[in-house]
């Protein structure tokens, strides 16, 4: 297999999944040459529907993703999956393996599954999730599904990446809605009450309905639906996929797809600008900023003054 990123990109577009996987790996490793491959793919991206699945730990997101993929395959859709997991404190890699959780699709050529470690990135996504989504999009997958890490209320970055964001909740989490209301309640286009066979599932759905009525109405007129599922038994999955596809149609007819794509580009731009500006400032220091960092560690300077000093000298 070639290591030239442009050649990898070309082979990925032709359907060679191993080349796409290699390019994503290079992007994860921070190989700047891989950006050449990514740029070669950009003109061919923009056709996939990007679906984000988020929610608290224990909500059954992985099983739900597995069932959604199964339903999409029955509809003859090609699906790319990016499953974001917490980083191992020892290896830095993803703690859970994608193929362990979704091994029913591991040999399906119409499904591409990739685990990514957060590597300290906040917001519930891996830093490379944006780039990997572009690669899978350009490879011709009809839908790219992003499963966030599931750390709680702060994992809202997925809304910057996905066209449709689905928020999963379950009954039996104590103060059910309190567990999800801060932050992610505002980002959902679709709300899922999973494990709907458990007691109080209807109560959770009613609480969600009541809280959604407190939201400001969406400018595009979309009223987020609530879908009840039992992922373990694949119940409610066709209805959920119907709802997701209905949202995609709504976005197409209201200009939402283009608006979200522009927002994603702006997010990538700002992230890159911050990253490269910081690298340039540090590179301008004779010691790479080590002396200021040492002074900060010793308490000789506060973080704000340290940044001011770096910028003024950079």
Image: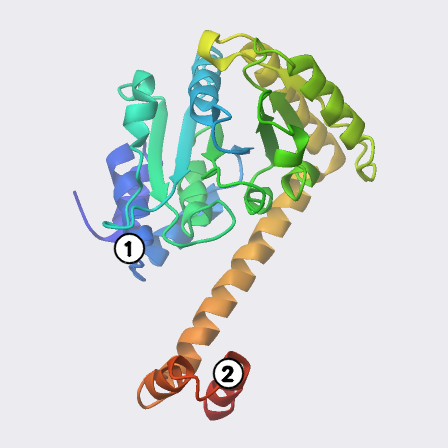
Task: Report the front residue among 185 and 13.
Answer: 185
Task: Report the front residue among 58 and 312.
Answer: 58
Q: Is residue 117 visible?
A: yes
Please state, as top left, top right, bottom left or bottom right, where the N terminus lies in the image: top left
Q: Is residue 180 visible?
A: no
What residue sits 53% from the left and 86% below the top? Answer: 305
- Where residue 75 sits in the image (x, y, percent)? 49, 12
Q: For residue 29, which numbered disc appears in the image? A: 1
Task: Report the front residue among 138 and 201.
Answer: 201
Callout 1: helix, strand or loop?
Answer: loop
| In the rendered image, the vertical position of residue 185 relative to residue 67, given as above or below | below
Callout 2: helix, strand or loop?
Answer: loop
Task: Report the front residue among 9 and 169.
Answer: 169
| In the rendered image, the vertical position of residue 40 relative to residue 50, given as above or below | below
- Where residue 145 sits in the image (x, y, percent)? 48, 31
Instruction: Report the residue marked by disc 2.
Output: 302
| In the rendered image, the vertical position of residue 163 relative to residue 110, given as above or below | below
Give whichever of discs 1 and 2 has the lower sequence position.
1
């Amino acid at each position: 297999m070639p290591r030239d990123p442009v050649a990898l990109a070309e082979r990925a577009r032709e359907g060679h999944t191993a080349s796409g996987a290699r390019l994503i790996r290079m992007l994860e490793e921070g190989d700047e040459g891989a950006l050449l491959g990514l740029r070669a793919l950009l003109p061919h991206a923009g056709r996939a529907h990007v679906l984000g699945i988020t929610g608290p730990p224990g909500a059954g997101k992985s099983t739900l993703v597995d069932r959604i993929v199964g339903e999409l395959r029955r509809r003859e859709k090609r699906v790319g999956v990016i499953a974001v997991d917490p980083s191992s404190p020892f290896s830095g890699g993803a703690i859970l393996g994608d193929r362990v959780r979704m091994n029913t699709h591991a040999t399906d050529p119409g499904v591409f599954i990739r685990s990514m470690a957060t590597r300290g990135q906040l917001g519930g996504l891996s830093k490379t999730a944006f780039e990997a989504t572009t690669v899978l999009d350009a490879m011709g997958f009809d839908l790219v599904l992003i499963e966030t890490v599931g750390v709680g209320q702060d994992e809202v970055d997925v809304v910057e990446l996905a066209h449709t964001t689905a928020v999963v909740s379950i009954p039996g989490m104590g103060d059910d809605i309190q567990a999800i209301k801060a932050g992610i309640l505002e980002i959902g286009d679709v709300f899922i009450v999973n494990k709907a066979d458990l007691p109080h599932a209807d109560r959770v759905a009613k609480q969600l309905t009541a809280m959604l009525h407190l939201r400001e109405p969406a400018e595009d007129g979309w009223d987020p639906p609530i879908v009840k599922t039992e992922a373990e038994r694949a119940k409610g999955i066709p209805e959920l996929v119907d709802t997701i596809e209905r949202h995609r149609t709504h976005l197409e007819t209201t200009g939402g797809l283009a608006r979200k794509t522009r927002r994603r580009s702006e997010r990538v731009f700002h992230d890159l600008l911050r990253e490269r500006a910081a690298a340039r400032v540090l590179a301008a220091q004779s010691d790479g900023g080590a002396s200021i960092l040492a002074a900060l560690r010793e308490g000789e300077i506060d973080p704000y003054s340290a940044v001011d000093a770096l910028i003024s000298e950079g």
